[in-house]
Amino acid sequence: MDDTQRYDAIVIGAGQGGGPLAGAFAKAGRRTLVVERTHVGGTCINEGCTPTKTMIASGRVAYLARRGAEFGVNTTNLTIDLARVRERKRKIVTEFRTSSEQSLAKAGVEVEFGHARFLSPHTIEIEKPNGTRLEASADIIVINTGLRSLIPNIPGLSDIPYLDSTSIMELSAVPEHLIVLGGGYIGLEFGQLFRRFGSRVTVVHRGDQLLPREDPDVASAVADILKEDGIDIRLRTNTTSIARTTSGGIQLSPDIVGSHLLVATGRKPNTDDLGVAAAGIELDDHGYIKANGRLETTAKGVYAVGDVKGGPAFTHVSYDDFRILRCNLLHGGNASTVGRILPYTVFIDPQLGRVGMTEKEARDAGFDVRVATMPMSYVARALEMDESRGMMKAVVDATSGQILGCSILGIGGGEIMAQIEIAMMGQVPYTALRDGVFAHPTLAESLNNLFATLD
């Protein structure tokens, strides 16, 4: 069409990959358009990392306040003002979102709010909130549309006012009894959070263990911590129907009845209404965009970044995708996702930090492995802080001494994991951490003792 707006680059979705990439294009003198359906910043800022970890911080304060007497600090009449917790969360989200909006504006990025749909490999239609439509085209189009909650097809669920990972953060009062459907990291983070706020919590999971990605011993240690916190965990429990009770509760089985239900059974890609067929963009069986190591889709000049292409759904992955495309498209580089080391942290408390291979993955890959394990109760700093729950585990190549991966379940687990990740990035053998001189008393010196278990 003659009125089609022409750009050098179009980014669909302003998440933690798309937003910075759009800014980089604009700063390089490329006319750049961002199309965003709801708000700048993506899941991380608006519904994911920022709000959840803000609320989890409030939960930790409640946890420590209840334990005050153990530290010789008397706290009485503890109450939870969930509305105030929510307002604190909203304030921080608004600050982060505003900062993202300002970054785009400062870089000179044009932003259109609405729903984008491909008409051809290099032309999209944008349906704006008021119903008007416009077309835009570019030689480079980047898809950063992310994921949304996957709601399972369970009889009766549609008749229940269930919560998802977004709506649960808008509650103004603490649930009496929260049922969490799903034993992944989202469900466990919220389950522990609301337990600390005072709810009874039941986690219902159909698998044999919580956190299916983890080795069984690590998942078992996580379950032990949550049980100690008073959470009821039901494994190998398949929910076949959901109903309202006569008193207004929510019932999953004869003995699982609660006041509120959080559905945390996974997430699905936002590709079903993107018009990918018109662009020749192929999807996998689960609706994720197929992309190679250079983030190229099956349509020339069209790229995918972040969660929408499958794989680990974490902000730092999306941001690294941005760096890859910036390198390749703006600086003529040849960066790739192949071989990159991917860490993550599950923000239960104490944290679970993980990077690289699990023991099972390493053995399945054919490595001759040695496994170092140690309870956190062996860590002096953890004992001093009266948080010695959890365990440390590292997997080492028996031939080279290189660290293949680790799982750190404990106070500061994500930070300790990052130290091991740095060693992996530098191909430093485990013996260097075993023999390194770390300040006492810090959590870092636990690496001496962890790797000494291999002697």
Image (cartoon, helix red, strand yellow):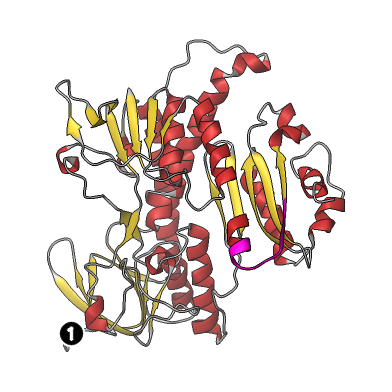
The residue pinned by badge 1 equals 3
Of residue 153 and residue 193, the one placed in the foreground of this image is 153
Q: Is residue 182 above or below residue 74?
A: below
| Amino acid type for the residue under numbered disc 1 | Asp
* Residue 439, visible in the rendered structure: yes
User: Seen in the image, is 236 located left or right of residue 226?
Assistant: left
Q: Secondary structure at mark 1?
A: loop
Q: Is residue 119 visible?
A: no
Check if residue 369 falls in the magenta segment: yes
> Quadrant of the rendered structure where residue 89 is?
top left
Mark 1 Cα within 10 Å, few/some/many (few <14, many 20+)?
A: few
The one of 179 and 15 positioned closer to us in this rendering:
179
Counting from the top left corner in percent of width and height, residue 336 is at: 55, 78
Q: Residue 250: name its quadrant.
A: top left
Locate residue 86, reporting x and y percent.
Answer: 38, 34
What residue occupies the far left of the structure in this picture?
Answer: 131
Q: Which residues are magenta?
A: 363-371
In-image side of 446 versus 89 (left or right): right
Indicate whether 307 appears above or below 135: above
Left/right of residue 37 with respect to residue 96 in the rendered view: left
- Give the residue displayed 74% in from the left and 66% down from the top: 426
